[in-house]
Image (cartoon, rainbow, N blue to C red):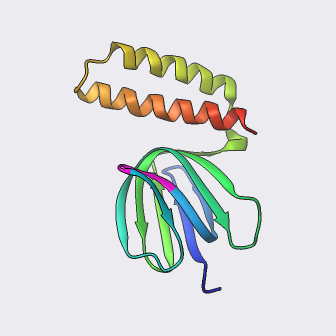
Amino acid sequence: MANTYQLDIVTPERVMLSELAVETIAPGTEGYLGILAGHAPLMTTLEPGEVTVAFADGRTTSRIVIGGGFMEVSAAKTTILADSAERIDEIDVSRAELDLEEARKLLDAAVLGTPEAVAAKRANVLAETRVRLGRSR
């Protein structure tokens, strides 16, 4: 299949996904990136957010929350090395809501421009994404 590529999403705990895909959309540092087969080689950092995958076999698109990481792209393969990753069916919405409350407290207490503020912002984005996607099931 010329319009497909191998997609692997890997965390320190597991291989979350290893399948043929036709499109991947991932949260890059400068905005969302769309990847198709034959994409130019690329290595980039990823922010916390939603990864959307359209599979080669026509299944429903998969939506995954990642906690940031790295993505390597070649013409025939894309690898996402994620700090953490959850499919939307794995999200415990109650826990995600508690994490969001905690992340907002950290963000409110953080001093702008500090490493703590950056970490609090990332935690807030991750928690918001988990809550939003967890509720959308």
Prevailing secondary structure class for the magenta stretch in the rendered image: strand
Residue at position x 68%, y 55% in the image:
62
Give residue 119's position: percent from left, percent from top. 35, 31
From the viewer's perspective, tell me whether residue 109 is left or right of residue 111: right
Rendered residue at 36%/69% (across/down): 42
Task: Please give the name of the residue rendered at 76% of the width and 59% of the height, measured from the top-left corner.
Answer: 60
In the image, taking residue 23 as reference, residue 80 lies left or right, namely: left
Which quarter of the image is occupied by the N terminus? bottom right
Measuring from the top left, give residue 102's x and y in whole percent: 49, 18
Instruction: Confirm whether the magenta stretch covers residue 14.
Output: no
How many marks on residues? 0
Does 68 sit above or below residue 56?
above
From the viewer's side, name the closer residue of 106 and 37: 37
- Locate the C terminus by quadrant: top right
Q: Which residues are magenta?
A: 26-30
Residue 70 is drawn in which quadrant?
Answer: bottom left
Please say if 72 is above or below 14.
below
Depth check: give the residue in front, 34 or 19: 34
